[in-house]
Each structure stands twice: as structure tokens, then as C-alpha cells.
Amino acid sequence: MGFFDFFRRKARPKNQSFKRSISSPISELKESIKSLGDPNYPFLHKDYSPSSRVPCADFTAFIVDRLRQNDIQAISILMRAILEANPGVGIGPEWIDEKIESVVNAPFDKYISYTEEVALFEIRAMWIIAEKDGGGREFWIAENSKLPLMFSRALCCYHFELLPAFIELLKKANRSIKDLRKDSDYWKDYPLFEPDMLKITGLSENACKQKILTLSIGARLHLFYAISSGEGSLTMLTDYNLRSFGLHIPWTTKEILDSELLIPTDDSAGLLRSFSKSDLISICKEKGIDFRGSWNKIKLLGALEKSAPDFVRATMREQNIVSINPRFKEHLLSIYAYSTKLENIYKILCFI
């Protein structure tokens, strides 16, 4: 049973002991990621400083599972572990407990109604992960923050309806921005939200939409980032914002390839994203291929294709060079565009 399948399992029996409901999920989670994390901080990414609070995997499935069981203590144990190496100056990681409680009690259902119940669990799970950075939620909508876009991309395939109270939340968001302008020049030119931003036509049902919803949240985010970046190595088509949220790239790469939404491509141009000019020069030297130092990457790759085609094909497989599956391209690009339009809605929701 895989990591994400495990945490999508059926609910535990209600008469199971309280002690087990707290300790067992955490120990099982730790066991499932034992080879991924930092030796001293098992829930943190081993390739980043523990003080950066970068999770070694996407833990939203675990949090959704625990929210369904009302096991807030297990979520607290996980989030404290993520903060353990850098809880803040002069404080301990327990400050996250109040943030978690705030997310759990946030009245989403006053402002937005999802047809699929799981969407509310998923947005709460994403918010809980986002809280690891501390500060107020107004910073989630800052120009350098990608969080609202990540929320909209992860949840865009769920059908939703904005409730009448949402317009009051929009007004609250605008009042907050005006107050922020008084305290900092940063917010001086930040645009206010307009009611017309809420007029968005929903998605039609299609197989592509359903395929996306079978992916974990991390894989959905990886998929959409790959689409935004264009053809290239799927394992390299991520950014720090995505990795900092929590991602184990081999897992999400496998999910995406298994979905067939992105598929391996024969177009070697995708390798240009994977290798620098110096990389290509080194390979040409290693293969004994004549080249000129003045050549650009395209010419260097062309020389490689001509003289070492088997190497190029093997490298494309190893690097997971992908493109959008033509069968799903129209719908997938439409969903991608739709997810971008939803960003303002998820920005406004940050003011709950």
C-alpha cells in the first residue's frame, strides 16, 4: 500500500483507543518516509537546512486523514516536528497549535460551498502547512507569495459555489489592504479586489478533470507547475515555493506519469532545460564530439543528436522529458487557465 493510498484509507473504528489514534498515525507516517528525511529531523528535507522548515514530502494527505478523525493532536505533533529546528527566537514550536486551531475553526462554509466534501478538508490541510512560515495570513497574498495560486490549482477541479456572504469577505479584504497601506509602503500599490473578479464560468465535466482529482495535492501542484514551465524534465520542473510546501519529487513524478496527463516525448528540445551549456560541452568532450566553444546550447545538442543518438534517447528517458498528452491537451490547458482565474478568490479567502 502506497503512502497516499494509506492516508486515504477508511476511517478507524470509533471505539479504538485514544492513545492509538494519536501515536499510531504519526509512527506510521514516520515509517513511510524513513528514507527521505533529515537524519535528525525525519519530517524535514535532507537536502535543505533544517532551519528552512522544508518538509521532506507532501503531508496534506496525512493531515486530511487526521482532520477526518478529528485527531488534531497528531497534526500538532507533525507541525511541531517541522518547526523543531527553527521554532523562532526565544519560543518553542507549540505556537503552531493556535494556528492549527484557527484553521480548523475557520468558517469556510459561510463563504464557499464545495460539492465534494473532501475539498474543505484539503483546503484546511493546505492552510495548516502554510502556517509553518508564521506571520499573518495577509502575507499569503503578498506579491512574492504563491500560496493562493497553489490553493486554486490544487482545488480547481472541485465544483464550488460562492455564497452571498463572500461579497462581505471581499469588502473585509479591501478594508484590511487599506489599513496595511497606512503602515507600509509595500501595500501602497496593491490592488483592491473587485466584485467582477468573482464572475468566473465553471469547468465542464471531462476525463481530464477527473484524472487530476485522482492525484495527490503535491502531484497536482507539480503537474500545473510543469505545464506553466513548458516541455522539459519533469523531475526538474519545480520551484522552491513548491518544494518548500512539501514535495517528494520521485513520488509526484510517478503519479503524473501514471496518469498519462504528461507523457515522455521524443522531442530532444526538452533537454535544453536540463543541461547548461557547460554541461553539454563536457558531454561532447566525453563523447569525443567535435564542437566550437562559441556554439549555443541548440548547436551543441544538435551535435550530440547526430553523433550520439542512443545517448540522447537514454538521457531523455532518465530525465523524464515530458510534454502534454495530445489526448488531454485542450482540456488540460483550459483547466490550467481556469485555475489561474481562481487565484483572487483564494486570496480573498485568506481574510476569513
Image (cartoon, rainbow, N blue to C red):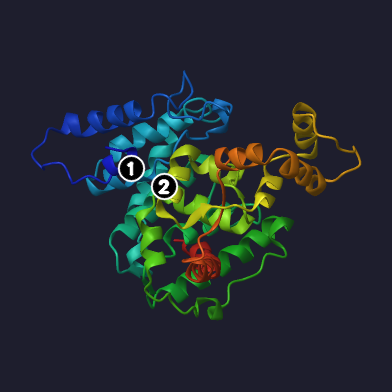
Residue displayed at 38% across by 38% down: 97
Whether residue 12 is visible, yes or no, is yes
Q: Which residue matches tag 2?
A: 255
Along the line of sight, the residue nearer the viewer: 163 or 293: 293
Nearest the eye: 250 or 52: 250
Q: Which amino acid type corresponds to the residue marked 1 in the rendered image?
A: Phe
Give how far apart the Cα atoms at labels 1 and 2 are. 10 Å
Q: Which residue is mark 1?
A: 4
Quadrant of image for the C terminus: bottom left
State the image coordinates of residue 107 (x, y, percent, origin top left).
35, 61
Report the side of 339 relative to 267 (left or right): left
Mark 1 lies on a secondary structure that is helix
Instruction: Say which amino acid is labelled 2.
Output: Glu
Q: Quadrant of the N terminus?
A: top left
Image side of residue 272 versus residue 124, left or right: right
In this orientation, does residue 126 appear? no
Residue 96 image offset from top left, x and y in percent: 43, 38
